[in-house]
Image (cartoon, grey):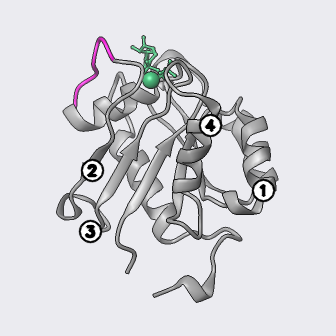
Amino acid sequence: MRKDVRILLVGEPKVGKTSLIMSLVSEEFPDVVPYRAEEITIPADVTPERVPTHIVDYSEAEQTDEQLFQEISKVSIPNKGASWCISSSYCLLITLLCGVDIFRVPLILVGNKSDLVEHSSMETILPIMNQYSEIETCVECSAKNLKNISELFYYAQKAVLHPTGPLYCPEKKD
Ligand code: GTP
Ligand code: MG
């Protein structure tokens, strides 16, 4: 069994990455958040897959590109495996990640702030999903309404533990 799971949230500023983490932890929407949440570790016994799970925030305001790439390498297979929280407009980064072998990570596309939109954004997301097989799943959620928050982190955990994409390496299975 894998020893732990590392989830990195990446996306454009203000999409709600930090709010998603804080909402998960406190089970309420925080009015004020720092740019970047401290890394948190969820103990194995309270995660659905019974694996300790580290959740890591990213903020362009506080971190350099170099620091971002260090975090990316920490979540990349064969290092550890990972999942991502990425806004749909981050296609360039996805392209970059999918194009470079050392950065093979299962991705999850997250559409936060679903409380602000009346219609589903799935139509926008599906073509992106079809283009990149590394994207394991997509989820619409709201940090504000606490909608799909625990589900989102569960999908991320599952994507690391049971990836269906091409990054699955049989020899790594133990
Ligand atoms: P950076 O750290 O700058 O990259 O931003 P971030 O992605 O961490 O976003 P942050 O959590 O700071 O949230 C940005 C703004 O969006 C804040 O004003 C939040 O209150 C708001 N926000 C976050 N999630 C939601 C949501 O689900 N619904 C609504 N309506 N607002 C949200
Ligand atoms: Mg933030």
**CA gap, disc 1 and disc 3:** 31 Å
Amino acid under disc 1: Val
Residue named by callout 3: 50
Residue 138 visible in the picture? no
- Mark 1 CB in 8 Å range of ligand 1? no
Is residue 173 positioned above or below 50 on the image?
below
Left or right: 170 in relation to 130: left
Residue named by callout 2: 41
Q: In this rendering, which labeled residue sits more in front, label 4 or label 1?
A: 4
**CA gap, disc 2 and disc 4:** 23 Å
User: Could you say which is closer to the camera, residue 67 or residue 94?
Assistant: 67
Residue named by callout 4: 66
Question: Of helix, strand and loop, which one carries label 2?
Answer: strand
Question: Of helix, strand and loop, which one carries label 4?
Answer: helix
Please tell me which of labels 1 and 3 falls first in the chain: 3
- The local crowd at label 2, few if under 14, some if 14 to 19, many if 20 or more residues have their Cα within 10 Å, is some
Please identify the dominant SS of the magenta region.
loop
- The local crowd at label 4, few if under 14, some if 14 to 19, many if 20 or more residues have their Cα within 10 Å, is few
Was residue 117 drawn as part of the magenta stretch in this picture?
Answer: no
